[in-house]
Image (tube, rainbow, N blue to C red):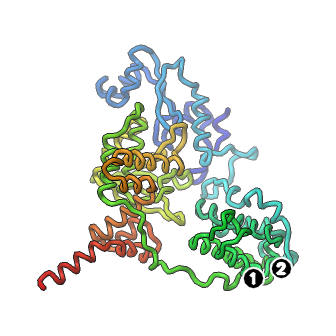
Amino acid sequence: MNPADWIDGGMTPPRRLPADTDAALAYLADTLGRVVYTRWTLAAIRGRYASLADAKVAHPAVMRQLLDHAVVIEYWDRGRVRTADIDDAPTPEVVLQRVLHTHRRRFKVSPEAGLPAATGEPIRDTTALVTVPHPLIAWLARAGRFANVASATNTLGVGDDAQAVALFLRDRASRSPHTLRAYRTELRRLAAWCEAQQFGPLSDLTRHDLLAYRQALRKPAHDAVDDNNNRTVAEATQARALAVVASLFRYWTETGYLTANPAAGLVRGGRSRTSFAPERMLPGALLAACDAWVAEGFKDDDALVVARRRAIWALYRYAGVRLVELVWSDDAQLPKLEVDDGECWTLHVLGKGRKTRAVPLPGLCVPILKTYRQLRGLPPQPSPYEHAALIHGLKGGSLHSSGLYDEVKAIFIAAADRIEKTDHAGAARLRSASPHWLRHGYARQLVVDHQVPLPAAQALLGHASMQTTASYAKTDLSQLRTFVDQTFSDR
């Protein structure tokens, strides 16, 4: 393996790694902001630190190993720093290859032609953004009677629905992986309904066909999509399904792929955001039960697992972030922690629409996060140049949405088991809770309990509309009761 064959796409402009393995490892350690591969001896320790006591504080595992071995290797493996004597440690080349694989979205093998042009943009793999779900490709690979295939006004320049759908997903849904997943789901739903009705392709559907699809979503029917038990589709799902269909046909018409838009008027406005009333949140007593279990109730032998779960809970509990906002993004290098000159900690996340947001963290989060970072082998306080995943995966890389969900869910269930005998209803509510309930509770504390100004609460929560933020105030009947009691207390 030649390190010089690899390109760091996270730099502007992109640059090659040094050809020497040791130099490449040093480059990765500097750019990623963490230990990658370090060779320690007593002489190296004495040259780095003023005393062995200081070295023991900074590298306790290394110092323990140096008591029995002349050379100790400190290296990054599967999301954490490990130490081993030189005979048991992997070679520098193996560690280099593992790190490059872990960060494969950022580091790419250079094409044979050499260094790509310095465009100033990071190298990104956008192939996945324009692919159509595999089961749909064969069904979509044709054009209907309304497709404007041969015309010069077809600005998409494609000849079948499969290619046209791929471009629609790229242009209208690629900003968020969650939006992309939702759009694909609705396209599968529409295609399945068309197959059941022996309609299709999509560019062959008439307005009458789409109105029949809308009716199928609204009424229970044995031939309705995802309706094997003769149940109606939820109202929110109906609205999303029709919105995606309307967006697809509008896009095709605007780009000239279709001669007319059969979905015009299919969606007659949307539900007002003023009707949004968040109800899925936990009362203070149940949150306190979860807090108590997090502080006392761990039985894991691995201190790192314990510290990670506490860090996850603290961030969801006191930052009000969405589930996916703690998932590491190589492209954006988020989420990350920042510490200012006043020792105040801030969490930076990538929200909906790839908009960044800064969330100040309360002081009680700081010791929890410091402990977790130290057990990972990171400095207690993050540096501005750090590029490590905020929450690591035990098998390498970062922890994804499903893992984060499972960690929070495990806390809910454990707390429910603890209070089962004294509060059966509360335990049942905890078992039905999800991480997003913590976000609702965070918003309620801001808006209702502490009456934070709505613009400030909106900025902390990352809401696109202030109406969404204001809707949390509608959920508190006790505050209205207090106002009424105070108003009529003298009568």
Mark 1 in CB contact with mark 2 (< 8 angstroms): yes
Query: In the picture, which quadrant includes the N terminus?
Result: top right
- The image position of residue 258, as x and y in percent, is 79, 79
Q: Is residue 314 visible?
A: yes
Q: CA distance from mark 1 to mark 2?
A: 10 Å
* Within-10-Å neighbours for mark 1: few <14, some 14–19, many 20+: many
> Label 1 belongs to which residue?
262
Local secondary structure at mark 2: loop
32 with respect to 130 (left or right): left
12 with respect to 143 (left or right): left
Of callouts 1 and 2, the N-terminal one:
2
Taking depth in this image into account, of 166 and 446 the one nearest to the observer is 446
* Within-10-Å neighbours for mark 2: few <14, some 14–19, many 20+: some
Taking depth in this image into account, of 261 and 300 the one nearest to the observer is 300
Q: Is residue 266 above or below residue 13?
A: below
Query: In the picture, which quadrant includes the C terminus?
Result: bottom left
- The image position of residue 490, as x and y in percent, is 11, 83
- The three-letter code of the residue at mark 1 reads Pro
- The three-letter code of the residue at mark 2 reads Phe
Question: For residue 313, which numbered disc appears in the image?
Answer: none
Local secondary structure at mark 1: loop
> Label 2 belongs to which residue?
146
- The image position of residue 404, as x and y in percent, is 48, 49
378 with respect to 134 (left or right): left
Q: Is residue 459 above or below residue 412?
A: below
Q: Is residue 200 visible?
A: no
| Residue positioned 43% across, 59% down in the render | 321
Q: Which quadrant of the view contains residue 87?
A: top right
- The image position of residue 95, as x and y in percent, is 57, 31
441 with respect to 145 (left or right): left
Q: Is residue 223 above or below residue 328?
A: below
